[in-house]
Amino acid sequence: MYDIIIVGAGPAGLTSALYARRANKKVLVLEANTYGGQITNSSRVENYPGIEFISGFDFATNLYNQVLKLGAEIKFETVIRIEKDKTVVTNKNTYSAKSVIIATGSKNRKLNIKNEDKFIGSGISYCATCDGNFYKDKIVAINGGGNTALEDALYLSNIASKVYVIHRRDKFTGDKKYIDELNNKDNVEYIFNSVIISINGVDKLESISIKNKDNEEKTINVDGLFIAIGREPNNQMFYNVVNIDKTGYIISKDNVHTKTKGIYVAGDARVKDLRQLTTAVSDGSIAATIAIKEMKE
Ligand code: NAP
């Protein structure tokens, strides 16, 4: 029996593990993919207090190693279900705990158009820092207008020969700092008021077709398409123990309480105003601290 099982090894989940281990609790972290969550896609984190600059991957790796050193168990298994009695069922095992913290974050939003899945790994990517190097001196497009898209565009502008940034609005919603930097790049071209209507190719991505708000269509030859149109939660499997809003995020009370006693939520998986690294680690520390306090009660 574990004191706390944490579902998700992103910044929120790993921070919960850090706090729980420092309180000497028996901790298991369950992660379906790789540790670190979405911050590992960020080539530069410059807004974490006390750290002027760090790559998202380095941040996540430091946190992961810190938690392992403190004695948390981390297993790479996919959680399928959580029962009210805090039994956690994965694709491989069944575990029981006194408390559970759900820190599942979110997954990449898809365009949901033909060939998107087929060309993942052969032209389509959701992570510029992971796959950017495959596009040295090639032509790439990025879809999206938030910070991820702008950060990806900056990163890829140093690798690819040409970078198109395609956005459905007439201006970007990401930080001015990134826009100012991008404006100084002569291999970056913005295509506003446009959406991607088809992804074309035989065995790999060859071109994309876009349509603007006047319904004019055009096809652009590209070697890579980086889709950076935000994230979506992945909480449907927890419906029996938490309340979920219409967009799929977990509704919490006092930040981290769910509707089930002893089951908590932390990080991007919950309804909240600001989804950032700072707020994820904040949630993680609060969830663990409250779980430990309520376990004693
Ligand atoms: P985001 O801010 O939600 O931006 C998503 C972008 O994709 C928006 O431009 C949105 O357009 C567009 N979009 C959404 N659905 C679309 C669709 N179906 N087709 C075409 N375009 C679509 O997501 P994000 O950029 O991934 O950022 C997520 C959070 O992480 C934000 O809070 C961001 O500030 C933060 N972040 C921070 C950093 C950093 O500080 N270094 C880096 C990356 C991300 P509309 O505006 O029209 O909806």
Image (tube, grey):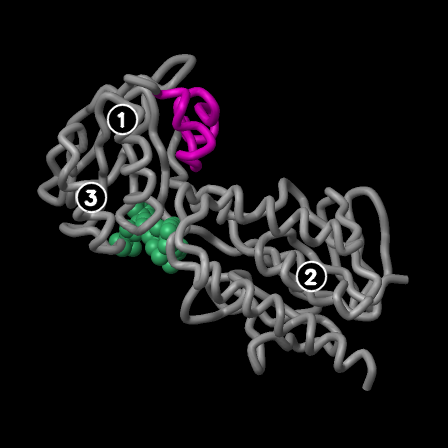
Q: What crowding class fits label 1: few (fewer than 14 Cα within 10 Å), some (14-19), or many (20 or more)?
A: many
Asked if residue 294 is among those painted magenta in the image, a careful observer would answer no
Q: Position of residue 124 (x, y in %)?
A: 40, 28
The one nearer the camera, 263 or 180, is 180
Residue 163 falls left or right of residue 4: left
Q: Residue furthest right?
A: 1
The one nearer the camera, 70 or 207, is 70
The one nearer the camera, 155 or 226, is 155
Dot 2 or dot 1, earlier in sequence: 2
Mark 2 to mark 3 CA distance (whole Å): 36 Å
Q: Residue furthest top?
A: 203
What residue is shown at x 49% (from left), y 66% (from top)?
Answer: 279
For the residues carrying marks 3 and 1, which lies nearer the camera in this image?
3
Q: Amino acid at mark 3?
A: Glu
Quadrant for the N terminus, please: bottom right
Q: Position of residue 17 (x, y in %)?
A: 70, 60
Inspect this view and state whether residue 257 appears: yes
Q: Which residue is mark 3?
A: 181
What residue is shown at x 44% (from left), y 28% (from top)?
Answer: 131
Q: Which residue is mark 2?
A: 18
Q: Are marks 2 and 3 in contact (CB under 8 Å)?
A: no
Mark 2 to mark 1 CA distance (whole Å): 45 Å
Q: Which residue is mark 1?
A: 208
What residue is shown at x 41% (from left), y 71% (from top)?
Answer: 273
Asked if residue 127 is among those painted magenta in the image, a careful observer would answer yes
Dot 3 or dot 1, earlier in sequence: 3
Disc 3 is placed on an element classified as helix
Residue 241 falls left or right of residue 254: right
Q: Which residues are magenta?
A: 115-135
Q: Amino acid at mark 1?
A: Ile
Quadrant for the C terminus, please: bottom right
